[in-house]
Amino acid sequence: MALTSRRKRPLDHAVPHLRDTRLIVIATEGAKTEGQYFDLFERKRVQIHVLPTEDGFSAPKHVFARLAEFKKECELGKDDQLWLMIDVDRWQESSLAEVASESIKKKFQLAVSNPCFELWLYLHHGDVDAGSRITSNDLKEKLREAMGSYNKAKIELDKYRGKEDDAIRRAKALDGNVNHRWPDQTGTHVYKVVEEVLAL
């Protein structure tokens, strides 16, 4: 597609924004949960545009391809950011490494969770031991215990609102090496995206 035929930046003009509003585009492994979570953030200086998984194409290479296609087809500002948000739990390290390497070449940023995005959600409510072998199912159960219920297809935003700083603090405490492409033990780099949003 020629540069001149690119689609305009997908800013939501129904939401108050400024001329220099930054766009943060996130391609996610999940179909619903991550997009719902980022509805928490409505700011004039930043808009978040989520590219969710559709039709079950959730493997890292598919999430990467969706973000690459977006970059090719849409106009972007110099301060806009492109993020790849994937989980460790279902994928082999070789596929993660390949996608991480390609992302660096494309200047995509990584927000990987080990084992899954639910870890980030739980960190709004409680601590997790970095050395624990916690599973996705464990985290869903912890979320049910903390909030009374948990449905990944319809998360209750009010139960997360105002707790973002706590989640960031806990995620940083788990992050043994911030320069690793993804957490090699229990941890999540979703905090890096949220810090970018809260800074604007």
Image (spheres, rainbow, N blue to C red):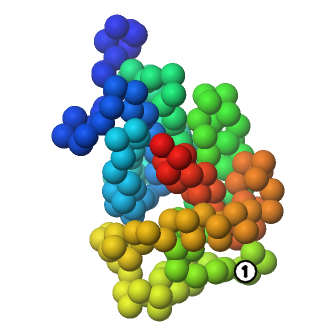
Measuring from the top left, give residue 144's x and y in whole percent. 44, 87
Residue at 67% x, 28% y is: 105
- In the rendered view, would you say 98 is above or below 76? below
The structure residue drawn at horizontal position 57% and vertical position 69%, both measured from the top left corner, is 167
Residue nearest the viewer, comparing 34 with 124:
124
Amino acid residing under circle 1 = Asp
Residue 62 is at least partly visible in this image: no
Q: Does the rendering let one see residue 166?
A: yes
Q: Say above or below: 200 vs 151.
A: above
Q: How many marks?
A: 1
Q: Nearer the viewer, residue 167 or 149?
A: 167
**Residue at (78, 48) in percent of width and height:** 179
Q: Position of residue 77 (x, y in %)?
A: 45, 23
With 113 as the anchor, is 72 left or right in this view? Answer: left
Q: Residue under circle 1?
A: 129
Q: Residue at x 70, y 37 (%)?
A: 101
| Label 1: how many Cα within 10 Å (few below 14, some 14–19, many 20+) | few
- Indicate the position of residue 143 as horizontal and vertical percent values: 47, 83
Q: Quadrant of residue 130?
A: bottom right
